[in-house]
Amino acid sequence: MGSRSSHAARIPDVDSIRRETGFSQASLIRLYHRFQALDRNEKGYLSRVDLQQIGALAVNPLGDRIIDSFFPDGSLRVDFPGFVRVLAHFRPVDDEDNGNRDPKEPEPLNSRMNKLRFAFQLYDLDRDGKISRHEMLQVLRLMVGVQVTEEQLESITDRTVQEADEDGDGAVSFLEFTKSLEKMNIEQKMSIRILK
């Protein structure tokens, strides 16, 4: 037992990270070891190249977009707290997460709304608060690859934007995005079990 708390002691600001992300101490220790393994040169931060070593991201059609989310505002490096903050969006929602949360506290990073915000920014490339037809087409092209023709892809894109676009401006706002995913179990779809 003593070794587990000594590992946690090596994690900078461990208590604040645990409160902000909702990760247990054991999960933070596992993630810290993973962070250190990715940081092969022991720089204390990760670069885009370091994150590209993660096999699941390498084969994910949205892998580059997910990697981009670790580097907001054009930053070139992510420290451990930033690494864990992004991963917290994929932490499964526990029943206890919903029940007795202090309304004055910020919404948990793994809440439905924060998961939706995270997913939205994967589509909203120019960060203008709307998903344009062009942005939707780019994402769908990544996701389906060569399995459909360009004509089919454009048709799917037009239909998707048209169904979600309630105000008729030809783009999908965050509110329209959330409404279009109302019936989807985003808490389940955007969860990675090992991140409990």
Image (cartoon, helix red, strand yellow):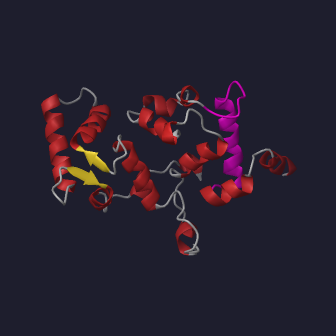
Q: Is residue 8 left or right of residue 81?
A: right
**How many labels, in total?**
0
- Nearest to the observer: residue 122 or residue 192: 122
Q: Give the image quarter of residue 7.
A: top right
User: Could you say where residue 134 lies in the image, as x and y percent from the top left?
Assistant: 23, 38
Where is 163 relative to 70, above or below?
A: below
User: Could you say where residue 14 lies in the image, as x and y percent from the top left?
Assistant: 73, 52
Q: Residue at x 15, y 47 (%)?
A: 159
Please give the range of residues in magenta: 22-46
Q: Residue at x 23, y 29 (%)?
A: 147
- Nearest to the observer: residue 173 or residue 95: 173
Q: Is residue 150 left or right of residue 75?
A: left
- Nearest to the observer: residue 22 or residue 138: 138
The question of residue 29 being in magenta is answered with yes
User: Could you say where residue 75 lies in the image, as x and y percent from the top left?
Assistant: 54, 36
Q: Residue at x 62, y 32 (%)?
A: 46
Where is 134 relative to 20, above or below?
A: above
**In the orientation shown, which residue stands out farthest toward the right?**
2
Q: Residue at x 60, y 45 (%)?
A: 82
Looking at the image, can residue 22 be seen? no
User: Could you say where residue 121 lies in the image, as x and y percent from the top left?
Assistant: 39, 47
Looking at the image, can residue 172 be seen? yes
Where is 14 relative to 139, above or below?
A: below
Q: Is residue 44 left or right of residue 183?
A: right
Where is 99 relative to 48, above or below?
A: below
The question of residue 118 being in magenta is answered with no
Q: Give the image quarter of residue 65.
A: top left
